[in-house]
Image (cartoon, rainbow, N blue to C red):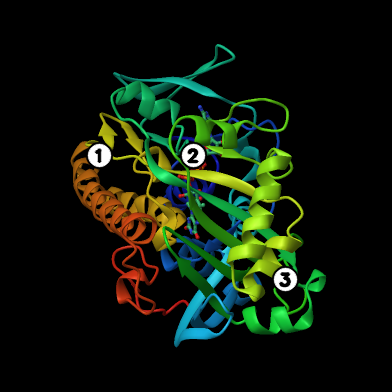
Amino acid sequence: MVVIGGSIGGLTAACLLRDAGHDVEIHERAPRELEQRGAGIGFLRACSRYLAERAGVDLDEISITTSEIVYLDRDDTVLHQAEHAYRFSSWNTVYRRLLRAFDGDRYHLDRTAVEVRNDERGASVAFDDGSALSADLVVAADGIGSTVRAQLLPDARAEYSGYVAWRGTVSEADLPPEITARLGDAITYHVYANSHILVYPIPSLDGSVEPGGRLLNFVWYRNYLDGGDLRSLLTDHGGVVRDLSVPPGLVAPEHVAELRATAAARLPATIAAVVAAVEEPFLQVVYDISISRMRFGRVCLIGDAAFAVRPHAAAGTAKAAEDAWTLDRHLRSGRALDSALERWETEQLALGCDLLDRTRRIGARSQVLNTWEPGDPELIFGLHAPGDPEPANV
Ligand SMILES: Cc1cc2nc3c(=O)[nH]c(=O)nc-3n(C[C@H](O)[C@H](O)[C@H](O)COP(=O)(O)OP(=O)(O)OC[C@H]3O[C@@H](n4cnc5c(N)ncnc54)[C@H](O)[C@@H]3O)c2cc1C
């Protein structure tokens, strides 16, 4: 079997298929091992499950459990506070552990898939160096900009949500102790007209999860008109116009200055201190992608290559991993491969549609309708539903 894309979705699928006895290889476009500088993730059960259940990883060593949800008012006072356990990690921490759980010799870097085809053996993948591979099954986990989706579903379009997520991390050691004490055991929100920001702790770049040695991560959703405003934001400091994100260190200085000035003027002081201390804020545009099929003969789309959902349920990596777990379950069902894939597709299309609807609704309430109520249960992170499953993994 061939997996295209070696991030969290692709690695989880490859590990599970390998465990089920299949001969699996991953082909990843990046020329060297992937690295994202510390972007935090809500670490939901579907995403942590492989590491906990199959790789023997103690989740406390790779993630942080917070115990409260806190909303701060503009004047920095507490508007709402409730006990709720969440687990947070970072993309690189999870990626490194999954990569370790897979066989390095079967993880091929610098391999860009350009085309897939169904054929008499199953399916085949062509790469940009002119080579091709055949397999019983091809799993396309090539992310939001999926080449495979573009080929198989040329009409599927990324729809701009109307806003971007500004993000950044700062070491706890670089912040005053009163700030880290206030933010270190919670997810802390501030909501104002047509925007919201949240802050939570994540492991440091070297993986430390000890208080004082971790990072604080912020995600700030801000509206930009499609057209000139968005284009200006996405024009990096070298003049290149980007489409999905502008990485750390490349955001044009005038936009970083505007971010810092708005943080100082508008956010509660505790959260503003975090934004001010981040050296290289970066941003990701929030898009929705909805598709009507995930299976094309012996080619399956999983994770962001299938549905891309807004981050408000913190469920993107969990959905990618769940697509893989469900595929594994159906392939083990004893049914013929095509029938198993058909059942898998039905189940995962429903999950993708539901999650997309929920995250669109949450986004609209925050960024457009201004109906976010601190403590509203719909705003709790979760894959299948807010707060699901019971935090057995916490
Ligand atoms: C602001 C923001 C906040 C988020 N917060 C969270 C969160 O808290 N929790 C959470 O779970 N998720 C979160 N997400 C979503 C999460 O990042 C994605 O859903 C997740 O990374 C999807 O994983 P994936 O494996 O499907 O795709 P990706 O991680 O995008 O990986 C795709 C891989 O495919 C490779 N590739 C691409 N094209 C090709 C090709 N042609 N050939 C070979 N390889 C290729 C890429 O190099 C990449 O390695 C957030 C997203 C955003 C934008």
In the rendered image, which quarter is residue 354 located in?
bottom left
Q: Which mark is residue 337?
A: 1
* x, y percent for residue 346: 19, 46
Q: Amino acid at mark 1?
A: Leu
Mark nearer the N terminus (3 vs 2) = 2
Determine which residue is flagged by label 2. Answer: 24
Q: Amino acid at mark 3?
A: Arg
* x, y percent for residue 114: 48, 19
Depicted 128 relative to depicted 60: above or below: above
Establish whether ligand 1 lies closer than 8 Å to the Cβ of label 1.
no
Mark nearer the N terminus (1 vs 2) = 2
In the image: residue 129, left or right of residue 173: left
**Classed neighbour count for the residue bearing mark 3: other residues with Cα under 10 Å, few (<14), some (14–19), many (≥20):** many
In contact (CB < 8 Å): disc 1 and disc 3? no
Give the Cα distance between marks 1 and 2: 16 Å
> Residue at image x 32%, y 49%?
327
